[in-house]
Image (cartoon, rainbow, N blue to C red):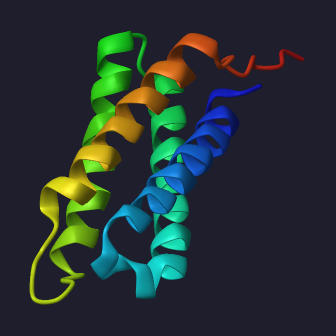
Amino acid sequence: MSKPVLGMLLGAVLGLLDGISAYAYPAARPAIASMVMGSTFKGFITGLAAGFFSTRLKSLPLGMLAGLAVGLILSWHVAANSPLEGRYYYWEIMLPGGAVGAIVGYATWKFGRTPQRQTQ
């Protein structure tokens, strides 16, 4: 499986699990559907970016760092724009988002295949 496709699939699955974990916060329960969809999309985009960077970067630490950075940036944007009951949940949103990015960066670099260029 190519690195971007692996990243998108793994990112979406981990994002889905991240969104479902928001059910543990009673204040988040009324908006759980939008949180699950948003986290899945955020994981999908993070996985796509991590897979793309893994095809370009020839270093595992740089691939993980790129996934971590994309995950943190997307998570920060969500955390900064979605207060619940007047409180912002930076740690609760950014920590799993960064972890998803780092995990997907590792997995795409380690297990994904780089597309081979066709010669004519």
Asked whether, in this view, residue 53 is left or right of residue 8, the answer is left
| Residue at image coords 56%, 55% | 16
Residue 104 % position (x, y): 48, 31
The answer to whether residue 18 is visible is yes
Residue 63 % position (x, y): 38, 23
109 is higher (above) or lower (below) than 84: above
101 is higher (above) or lower (below) than 36: above
| Residue at image coords 69%, 38% | 5
109 is higher (above) or lower (below) than 71: above
Where residue 28 sits, quadrant-wise, is: bottom left
Asked whether, in this view, residue 51 is left or right of residue 31, the answer is right
| Residue at image coords 16%, 89% | 85
Residue 26 % position (x, y): 32, 76
54 is higher (above) or lower (below) than 97: above
Where residue 98 sits, quadrant-wise, is: top left
| Residue at image coords 16%, 67% | 89
In front of the other: 31 or 1: 31
Work out which quarter of the rendered image holds the C terminus and state it: top right
Residue 116 % position (x, y): 75, 17
The answer to whether residue 70 is visible is no
Where residue 99 sits, quadrant-wise, is: top left
